[in-house]
Amino acid sequence: MTSAASPASPPAFQYKAARNPLLWAATAYSGGIIAGAYAWRPFLWWLIAGTAFIGAGAYFTHRRAGLSLVLGLAAVFLIAALQIQSQGASSRRDTGIQPLADGRELSVTAHVISDGKMQVDGDEIRQSVEVETEEVTTASGETLAIHSGVRLTIYSAQPRNINGNADLERKTSSAALQPFRYGERLRFAGKLKPPRNFRNPGAFDFRAYLAERGISALGIAQAENVERLYGVAGSRVGRWRSRCHQAVLGKVHELWPLREAALIDAMVIGEEAFIDRNTRSDFQRSGTYHVLVVSGMNVSILAFVVFWVMRRLRMGESAATVVTVTCCVGYAFITEVGAPVWRATLMCAMYLATRLLYRDRARLNALGAAALGLLVLDPKSLFSASFQMTFLCVLIVAGIGMPILERSSGLYRQALMNWDSPEYARHLPPRVAQFRIDLQLVTWRTAPFLGKVWSRRVICGSVAFVFHAGELVLMSALMQAGLALPMAYYFHRATTLGIPANLIVIPLTQLMMPAAVATLVLGSVAPWLGKLPAMLTMLAIDGIAGSVRGLGALRLADMRVAMPDVWMMTLCVCGLLLAIWTVRRRWALAAGGLGILFASAIGIAAMPPKPRIHLGVMEVTPIDVGEGDSILVVTPKGRTLLVDAGGPIGPGGSQRLDFGEDVVSPYLWERGISRLDAVAITHGHSDHIGGMNAILENFHPRELWIGVLPPSYALDRVLTTARALGVRVIRHWERDDFEFGGASIEVLFPPRDWPVGPRPQNNDSMVMRIEFGETSVLLEGDAEKRVERRIASVYRPSASLLKVGHHGSANATTAELIEAAKPQYAVISVGLGNSFHLPRQETLERLEAAGAHVYRTDLDGAVSFYLDGRSVIPSVAALQ
């Protein structure tokens, strides 16, 4: 008698990696784009080489498949290089308006190509609207037909209590300040100027950004000089999209209070007009900025909810996929965000398609197909932060996160399925089957107290919740580690609180997004139907805002980092690739790959790069901050001093641009500088101290040097920030003389008995002479003739380099000071095409007569002067 054969145990879990030829093709295509952009070759060279590789690949197709694949990828590489170089010389915008963008008054007829956005700036209301010109009439009466893109700013003074879109439209008396919509025609009298970049290494390429949007000039006009015209222009699709977008915005402001509506505008619709700078900064500091803007996460949440609802309505998988993709396309169409959300929509559609066709086995291949399609359509998008971060997020999820979940919680989730089927456990891996049995034992123990049904629900629900929480922690950690490099490179932030912040914010966003959409849909039918989802939306929004505000306010959250070194960037890229490769191997290898990925991310935050400075010489670099002052001084021993930090003109100047955060800090980070030894304020005018708060917060200097302190809200705010950060505040007066990092600093002004006026004055300026060996620099701030003559007569200060006082105006740079200083070089910090017409010609002539070689930040950008103790060597930054 033979015994019955025992059933064979299930085989151990084997993870078989899918082949991803399209991902490799997208990688090769990306490499070709980079090569074509930075390694120019003749057009025919790329064409012949590409044809040769295609032919060789075809020849070896049936002989050596591996070699054929390599040759094919090389051909893709060369095709991409050919495409990017052929597009490099062409431009999608009409630049015919630029010869007229010289600051002279023009009369322009145009139509709107992007809806106007209203902003309140102090006592002023501004509307920013993008238009395409139709006719331009010059001051001489000549009329020209020109079709160029212009970003127009329309402004009008209004009361300060305007606080929302509805209020703006109700309280603004001028019809010209009613928001312009796509297709509307207008005529305005105003001035145009070409877009300008701050000429500093590391500065944001504003001109390229506008060029991508088809904008060739910037315009400004008063509201009373803007006239609406009869008729419409543009496409019907564009006008319909604009009406839908505005209808949704109007419904949002109708259903929710202003504060909640502003966040919903940004997070659901992509409208950021009502998000203030502090709120945006809190989201950035907490590592949750991705939820504030419409991004791939919004599309994925929408797709998940729609697909889940369709399946619960017993719709077939194919039909549910079609409905989901259609909803995502419609959402992308209405949001008006542009390329980022369309990229996310395409990637979502590709994923759903592969899920439908390949049963979720080719995620990376689908990602490669989406990336390849996007790059073929627009190769230059490879260089945009938006494309890189969108692609990287999906790559981290598909290439690292999902394989880990499939090998861990994904397996154990199977233990919760088919609960009442005894046979089901036979098909599970042994450890998963044992886990299932353990859970069933627990439910049997608790059944007498909870009942059989509720016992199962509580136990299985608790386990599923733990799995979900663990998966969320894992994905958040992987995202923070994988995005550490682009966050440091583009935004100079290390998101130390990203994991706990996302654990709170992402689930709330997953609740807020469908609740907000349900409120808009149901509220459009009947307001009472939308009350419940509106309440859920407000609870989620309040939770998100409170969490972000609380975490963003922590000192630990505000960690800024300089531009990473090349070796650190290489380590991060290699760590990411290694993690993708090892995660499909043995657990020991996978743990090692993940360890390198997390180690590289920690290194970005914890290991500041070596500052790019020259020891043994003194460096003086006036930074281009427009019509303001900011000067970096690096001593022979490597100590750093920043004198002033730029800012807007006048106390009521526009705060839309934070000069410390947006102009000065990027230059310092580009230089690898993450800490400053000292900062100095020459005097309290806004164009010198407007950016100082951001500098204090970003670089945590040890000392703040100040002189005269007249009554000033801006000065008080800087001092309050310095004391809160533990910065030592030092008052410096005339005749102070001290050593600083191998250089000697002498303060020439102000005296202790200098009269303090009711507000900051130019002649409050702290004047310093910094000497190294036989070379020296004289930093004047905005000192005028009275102070200059006193300094010249009392100290007779020689100076190899003169920082010209008051931006080269006629009330400074006296003959007495020039004769005493005898500068070899002079540098003027001044804005291009400024309304004050600085520097004055008589100032330039006095410097030229004295034999001084003059540099200007408006023409030369950030110029570094190296004083080696015997001579001065100027160096103009190489800018693209």
Image (tube, helix red, strand yellow):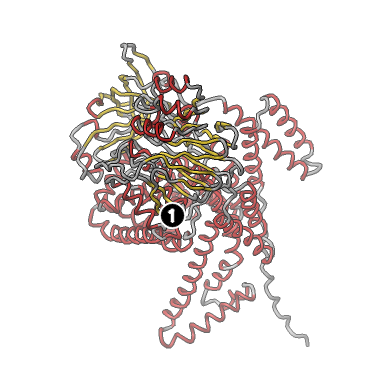
Q: Is 592 situated left or right of 264 in this image?
A: right
Q: Is 624 situated left or right of 237 in this image?
A: right
Label 1 is placed on what type of residue?
Arg
Q: Secondary structure at mark 1?
A: helix
Dot 1: within a 10 Å radius of its alpha carbon, few (fewer than 14), some, or many (20 or more) residues?
many
State the image quarter where residue 240 is shown.
top left
Q: Position of residue 406 (x, y in %)?
A: 59, 64
Residue, far front: 794
In depth, the one of 344 and 717 nearer the eye is 717
Q: Is residue 533 visible?
A: yes
Q: In percent of the image, x 61 and y 49: which residue is there?
A: 569
Q: Is 596 situated left or right of 807 in this image?
A: right
In depth, the one of 397 and 859 nearer the eye is 859
Q: Is residue 120 visible?
A: no
Q: Which residue is mark 1?
A: 285
Q: Is 73 situated left or right of 301 in this image?
A: right
